[in-house]
Image (cartoon, rainbow, N blue to C red):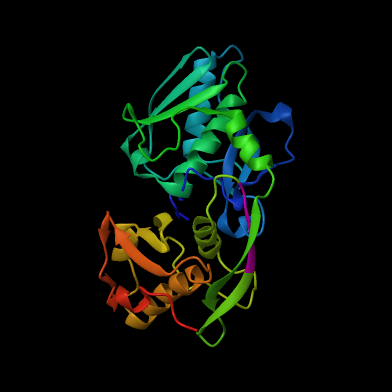
């Protein structure tokens, strides 16, 4: 993504793709940091990956200096080519303080725009990277000194991430994701989603859909930079919150807009409990997806 659901995606959720894999890099090479794999590399694998990174620090650097360097490297991205920053471009570190083994990371306003899976991934990468430093056991992240409202909690411990990662699968759910075939039509790809504690099926499905097909004969119709800020299901209605930027950047061709909308709706309707769809942006319900009336997919198809 820059894809979200909310953590981007939601949410406060660690998705199946967020299982953590440590890269085989020597510990003597630097500090252990956690980044995101590139989308293509993460398909069918782990999204959060670790890397030992060299930081430009003196041997006697203070804990605060080490933590600051860790956050700045997370913002900048890994030196490893196949790993990327968990934070979107433009975010800066405003301040960092440590008290009683808790570090408070104050980021610029862009962090407050994260939600869903994206927010979760950022929180988890920051938490794992900072608690790897001796002397830090808890992490709080703010935006311009304010708590981020969509965070499920305000203080994260390493165990919050690791328990979610190592926990038992609560259920597996069979879904169908829709991608383009060689004839330019949508074709379903069966997928088994593993749902862990704190996850929802709809969010997990959207992450898998945005990541793309496993079948190499299929391709995504949804643009790579398409962002979904959050997904929630309430009494059978699925609410999909799309970023305004993604709506503005939709292809002008109405037929392509239809395919994108159908890829989303057909995939979500493969979840049996979803009976209707509502698409939103900036909190407002959409009447049109580009030029396509959303009412055409508002109700679960019969048969």
Q: Does 23 lie within the magenta span?
A: no
**Numbered label tally:** 0
**Quarter assignment of residue 245:** bottom left
**Quarter assignment of residue 227:** bottom left
Q: Does 195 lie within the magenta span?
A: yes
**Quarter assignment of residue 159:** top right
Question: Residue at 31% across / 64% down in the picture?
Answer: 247
Q: Where residue 264 appears, x then y in whole percent?
A: 45, 70
In this orientation, which residue lies closer to the viewer: 72 or 148? 148
Q: Where residue 224 appears, x then y in whole percent?
A: 46, 63
Q: Where residue 67 appears, x then y in whole percent?
A: 52, 23
Q: Residue 138, relative to residue 115: is it above or below?
A: above
Please say whether residue 81 is visible from this viewpoint. no
In this orientation, which residue lies closer to the viewer: 67 or 101? 101
Q: Where residue 156 appears, x then y in whole percent?
A: 52, 29
* Image-based side of 89 in relation to 216, left or right: left
Residue furthest front as drawn: 235
Residue furthest bottom as drawn: 183
* Image-based side of 40 in relation to 65, left or right: right
Q: Residue 53, relative to residue 187: is it above or below?
A: above
Magenta residues span: 191-196
Please say whether residue 132 is visible from this viewpoint. yes
Question: Residue at 52% across / 53% down in the picture?
Answer: 200
Question: Residue at 41% across / 59% down in the picture?
Answer: 235
* Image-based side of 287 in relation to 301, left or right: left
Q: Residue 87, relative to residue 174: is it above or below?
A: above
Q: Please, what is the dominant secondary structure of the magenta stretch?
A: strand
């Amino acid at each position: 993504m820059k894809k979200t659901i909310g953590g981007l995606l939601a949410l406060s959720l660690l998705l199946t793709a967020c299982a953590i894999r440590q890269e085989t890099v020597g510990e003597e090479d630097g500090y252990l940091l956690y980044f995101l794999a590139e989308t293509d590399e993460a398909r069918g694998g782990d999204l959060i990956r670790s890397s030992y990174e060299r930081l430009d620090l003196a041997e006697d650097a203070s804990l605060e200096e080490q933590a600051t360097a860790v956050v700045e490297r997370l913002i900048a991205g890994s030196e490893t080519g196949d790993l990327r920053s968990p934070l979107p471009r433009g975010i800066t570190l405003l301040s960092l303080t440590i008290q009683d083994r808790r570090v408070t990371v104050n980021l610029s306003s862009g962090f407050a725009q994260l939600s869903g899976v994206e927010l979760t991934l950022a929180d988890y990468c920051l938490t794992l990277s900072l608690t790897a430093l001796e002397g830090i056991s808890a992490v709080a992240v703010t935006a311009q000194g304010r708590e981020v409202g969509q965070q499920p909690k305000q203080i994260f411990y390493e165990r919050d991430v690791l328990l979610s990662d190592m926990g038992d699968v609560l259920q597996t759910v069979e879904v169908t994701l829709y991608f383009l075939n060689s004839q330019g039509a949508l074709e379903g790809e069966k997928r088994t989603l593993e749902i862990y504690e704190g996850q929802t099926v709809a969010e997990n499905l959207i992450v898998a859909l945005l990541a793309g097909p496993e079948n190499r004969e299929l391709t995504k119709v949804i643009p790579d930079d398409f962002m979904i800020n959050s997904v929630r299901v309430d009494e059978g209605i699925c609410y999909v919150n799309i970023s305004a930027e993604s709506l503005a950047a939709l292809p002008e061709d109405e037929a392509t807009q239809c395919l994108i909308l159908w890829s989303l709706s057909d995939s979500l309707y493969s979840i049996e409990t979803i009976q209707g769809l509502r698409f939103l942006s900036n909190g407002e319900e959409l009447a049109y997806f580009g030029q396509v009336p959303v009412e055409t997919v508002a109700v679960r198809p019969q048969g």
